[in-house]
Amino acid sequence: INYGKHMARRIDLTIGVAYKEDPDKVLDVIRRVIDEHPLILAEPEPKIFVDSLGESSVNIAVKVWVPATMWFDVRRQIVSMIKKKLEEEKIEIPFPQMVIWFKTPLELK
């Protein structure tokens, strides 16, 4: 695929946050990061919204357009910037956890 053929290319991210977090605050924090990045295009307008409810997180969709030749660099930058900003704002990024139940108790030796 020739990604350089088009002038702009969309970055699609999914950011998972803990269920306890206020979705409006999360959207605002991510919006500020997007608005501050000089290479994210104003048109088409960036889209940031609650996309789905996952097993261990509320999933936020981030869809922004950037110059096609800068796609990889901008994607890498905004992932890092969003993570740092969420940490600064004390917004939890969960990871999957599993509880394992044994049908019969394990014997300790």
Image (spheres, rainbow, N blue to C red):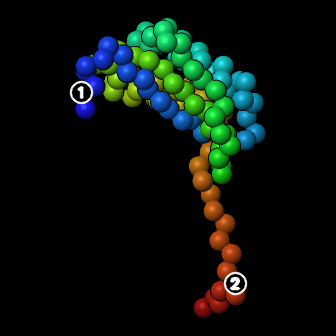
Against 70, residue 52 (above or below) is: below
**Tally of numbered tags:** 2
Residue at 53% x, 12% y is 45
Marks 2 and 1: which is nearer the front?
Answer: 1
Q: Quadrant of the N terminus?
A: top left
Callouts 2 and 1 close, C-beta under 8 Å? no
Residue 7 relative to residue 15: left or right: left
Three-letter amino acid code at the position of disc 2? Lys
Q: Secondary structure at mark 2?
A: loop
Q: Quadrant of the C terminus?
A: bottom right
Q: SS for tag 1?
A: loop
Residue at x 36%, y 16% (from the top left corner): 8
Of pointers 2 and 1, the one earlier in the residue sequence: 1
Q: Give the residue number, with chain letter if any, for mark 1.
A: 2
User: Does residue 89 appear anywhere in the picture?
Assistant: no
Q: For the residue marked with disc 1, what is the amino acid?
A: Asn
Q: Which residue is mark 2?
A: 103
Answer left or right for 19 relative to 82.
right
What residue is rendered at 59% in x and 15% in y? 32
Are there few (<14), some (14-19), or many (20+) residues within 10 Å of tag 1? Answer: few
